[in-house]
Image: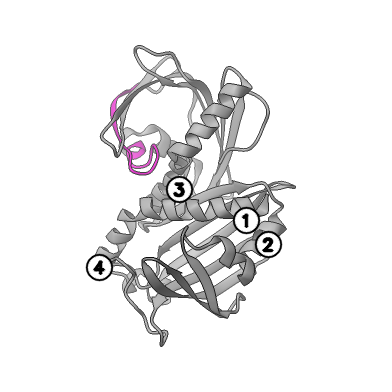
């Protein structure tokens, strides 16, 4: 989610665990950008990409509903590994929707990407920000994180971010206090009840989520808790005896997921939460996860986005 402002700009910052050259290549090489550009479920066809000042990137985004969205981006500034400035959202029959400035800086092997979307007015900026959120456009930058991880390590992960209007300590408590966690984490129309609620490093929780589709038991084992910056845990579906159980509604699914939650202070009263999940094998290695389980996990990333989005919406309502 982009940072709040009352101007005609929408600002967004992401930090990626990748060198700037890798991030730049992901943005500029057609075979890479096709792997992540656009909301979940969209695919991309590049018709031409002339990466220079005055050049154009012509592409079509294919929506999951079968609708095609042609685009023409015109570059104004191209500084390799540092900056791109371009117009976005034009077609041959329509002027650009807004102006984009993308900057990339590297420190200690990590890249900070800063985006500024400039629109004609504050009202236009508010409308575009609303549209981006409704269309799931913020998932574009999560997909970039997933792509960079796969390129660097071969690991397939799921990433989602949400910025919340609350101090980091308050947001962290909503994740680390079982009573508060139960109020926002379960999917809409379900309830969450703890049978064991020890949220601490080296401890575990056991909870039940119940709804009209039935009941499922989930065990979470906490590997690390670093208040108020990080929580790391594994999660499994289990039966009444806490033995591993199949994932509800899925014939194939990883037995264990590893989830890392990072809390970043964007301002004294604003916190960005980054959730990263991946299939988890024996001892943290992939030897306990089959290729079919990984592929099932990857196919479900759009569904995970919907699930986490509903949970984040509930969390956002609680912390406001």
Asked if the stretch drawn in magenta spans residue 41, the answer is yes
Count of labels in the image: 4
Which comes sooner in the sequence, label 4 or label 1? 4
Q: In this figure, which residue is indicated by the disc labeled 2?
A: 228
Give whichever of discs 3 and 1 has the lower sequence position. 3
| Magenta range | 32-49
Query: Around disc 2, counting alpha carbons within 10 Å, would you say few (fewer than 14), some (14 to 19), or many (20 or more)?
Result: some
Tell me residue 108's x, y (percent): 58, 50
Mark 4 crowd level (few <14, some 14–19, many ≥20, 10 Å Cα): few
Q: Are marks 4 and 1 in contact (CB under 8 Å)?
A: no
Label 4 vs 3, first from the N-terminus: 3
Give how far apart the Cα atoms at labels 4 and 1 are. Answer: 34 Å
Which one is closest to the eye, mark 4 or mark 3? 4
Q: How is the image coloured?
A: one colour
Residue 6 is situated, as x and y percent measured from the top left of the image, at 68, 28
Q: Where in the figure is residue 207, as x and y percent of width and height?
A: 50, 75
Q: Which residue is mark 4?
A: 251
What residue is rendered at 45% in x and 17% in y?
96
**Category of crowding for the residue at label 3, using alpha-carbon neighbours closer than 10 angstroms: few (below 14), some (14–19), many (at least 20):** many
């Amino acid at each position: 989610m982009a940072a709040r402002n009352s101007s005609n700009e929408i600002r967004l910052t992401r930090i990626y665990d990748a060198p700037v050259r890798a991030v730049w290549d992901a943005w500029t090489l057609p075979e890479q950008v096709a792997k992540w550009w656009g909301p979940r479920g969209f695919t991309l066809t590049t018709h031409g990409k002339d990466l220079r000042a005055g050049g154009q990137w012509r592409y079509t985004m294919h929506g999951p509903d079968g609708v095609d969205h042609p685009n023409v981006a015109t570059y104004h500034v191209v500084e390799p590994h540092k900056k791109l400035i371009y117009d976005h959202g034009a077609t041959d029959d329509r002027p650009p929707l807004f102006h984009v400035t993308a900057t990339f800086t590297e420190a200690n092997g990590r890249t900070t990407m800063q985006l500024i979307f400039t629109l004609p007015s504050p009202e236009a900026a508010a409308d575009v920000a609303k549209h981006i959120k409704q269309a799931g456009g913020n998932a574009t930058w999560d997909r970039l994180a997933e792509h960079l991880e796969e390129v660097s390590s071969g690991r397939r992960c799921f990433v989602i971010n949400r910025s919340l209007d609350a101090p980091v300590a308050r947001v962290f408590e909503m994740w680390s206090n079982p009573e508060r966690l139960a109020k926002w984490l379960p999917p809409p129309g379900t309830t969450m009840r703890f049978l064991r609620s020890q949220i601490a490093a080296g401890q575990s929780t056991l909870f039940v989520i119940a709804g009209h589709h039935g009941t499922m038991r989930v065990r979470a084992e906490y590997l690390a808790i670093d208040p108020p910056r990080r929580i790391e845990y594994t999660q499994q579906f289990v039966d009444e005896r806490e033995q591993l159980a199949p994932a509800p509604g899925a014939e194939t699914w990883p037995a264990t997921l590893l989830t890392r939650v990072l809390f970043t202070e964007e301002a004294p009263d604003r916190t960005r939460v980054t959730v990263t999940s991946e299939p988890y094998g024996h001892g943290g290695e992939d030897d306990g996860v089959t290729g079919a389980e990984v592929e099932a996990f990857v196919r479900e990333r759009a569904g995970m986005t919907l699930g986490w989005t509903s949970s984040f919406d509930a969390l956002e309502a609680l912390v406001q």
